[in-house]
Image: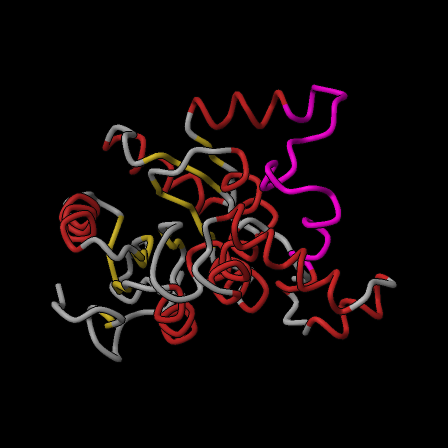
């Protein structure tokens, strides 16, 4: 196991998915992404102790995860949600778009609907909470590698209720008005105030006032923090 984050385990000669070089079935190759060292180390020990699983890389941020997956092409990625940089949801979106054969499973302490559905929209194939039993984590890795979608019991019930309930799904950031949420989505696209105003037919002052209200309601320290929160919640263009 490497000590530095963003490193490959096993070096440049690590086998590609499905490469049973010893004549036996290849292990499921896993990358783990978490900015908490204790959690990451625990997952490495757990998965490496299981027959048929090999941890080939670790990362501590979304950016590192995307780069590592590009180099290693693992079968499964276990991804935290809240991390420095782009975060787990945006990293999942980029990985799913660039490497659709790689299964991303979220493993996080955040079970709120806005995180769950943002992750699913980004392409995650599973969602587990960090309180899950070890055998559930191992079972989920195997299922994701087979192409199955897997959710923890609580998350699965809410996903099923959402599709069975005719009422619309809860919108992200319910504390915002519809107009503020619309503006936040455009902010998440990187649009400046002037472009937002022209697009929505609003004066620059009105846009600026709405942005100030958004920052206050989200307790965001600045515009960049609000954009990051919006992207993590699935707002903005993919």
> Percent position (x, y) of residue 80?
35, 50
Query: The C terminus lies in which quarter of the figure?
Result: bottom right
Q: What stretch is highlighted in magenta?
A: 162-185
Color theme of the render: secondary structure
Which residue sits furthest right?
Answer: 201
> Percent position (x, y) of residue 14?
27, 72
- Residue 172, compared with residue 207, is above or below; it is above
**7 vs 154, nearest the viewer:** 154
- Residue 228, compared with residue 128, is above or below; it is below
Q: Quadrant of residue 67?
A: bottom left
> Percent position (x, y) of residue 123?
57, 51
Q: Which residue is drawn at 35% across and 70% down?
A: 64
> Percent position (x, y) of residue 194?
75, 74
**127 vs 214, nearest the viewer:** 214
**181 vs 70, nearest the viewer:** 181
Which residue sits furthest bottom?
Answer: 12
Left or right: where does residue 109 sit relative to residue 111?
left
Left or right: where does residue 128 sit relative to residue 169?
left
Q: Which residue is drawn at 35% across and 42% down?
A: 108
Q: Residue at x 29, y 30 (%)?
A: 132
**33 vs 232, nearest the viewer:** 232
Q: Residue at x 26, y 57 (%)?
A: 35
Examine the structure image and report whether residue 114 is included in the region drawn in magenta: no
Query: The N terminus lies in which quarter of the figure?
Result: bottom left
Examine the structure image and report whether residue 175 is included in the region drawn in magenta: yes
- Residue 16, compared with residue 230, is above or below; it is below
Left or right: where does residue 32 sit relative to residue 160?
left
């Amino acid at each position: 196991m490497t000590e530095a984050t963003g490193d490959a385990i096993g070096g440049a000669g690590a086998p590609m998915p499905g490469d049973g070089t010893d004549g036996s079935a290849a292990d499921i190759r896993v990358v783990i992404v978490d900015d908490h060292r204790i959690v990451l180390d625990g997952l490495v020990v757990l998965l490496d102790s299981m027959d048929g699983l090999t941890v080939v890389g670790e990362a501590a941020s979304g950016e590192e995860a995307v780069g590592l997956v590009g180099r290693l092409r693992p079968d499964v990625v276990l991804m935290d949600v809240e991390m420095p940089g782009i975060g787990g949801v945006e990293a999942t979106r980029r990985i799913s778009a660039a490497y659709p054969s790689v299964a991303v499973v979220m493993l996080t302490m955040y079970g709120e609907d806005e995180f769950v559905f943002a992750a699913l929209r980004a392409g995650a194939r599973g969602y587990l909470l960090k309180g899950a039993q070890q055998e559930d984590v191992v079972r989920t890795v195997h299922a994701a590698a087979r192409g199955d979608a897997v959710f923890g019991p609580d998350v699965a019930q809410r996903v099923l209720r959402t599709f069975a309930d005719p009422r619309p799904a809860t919108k992200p950031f319910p504390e915002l008005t519809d107009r503020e949420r619309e503006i936040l989505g455009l902010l998440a696209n990187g649009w400046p105030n002037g472009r937002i105003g022209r697009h929505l037919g609003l004066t620059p002052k009105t846009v600026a006032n709405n942005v100030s209200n958004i920052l206050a309601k989200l307790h965001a320290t600045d515009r960049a923090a609000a954009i990051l929160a919006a992207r993590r919640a699935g707002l903005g263009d993919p």
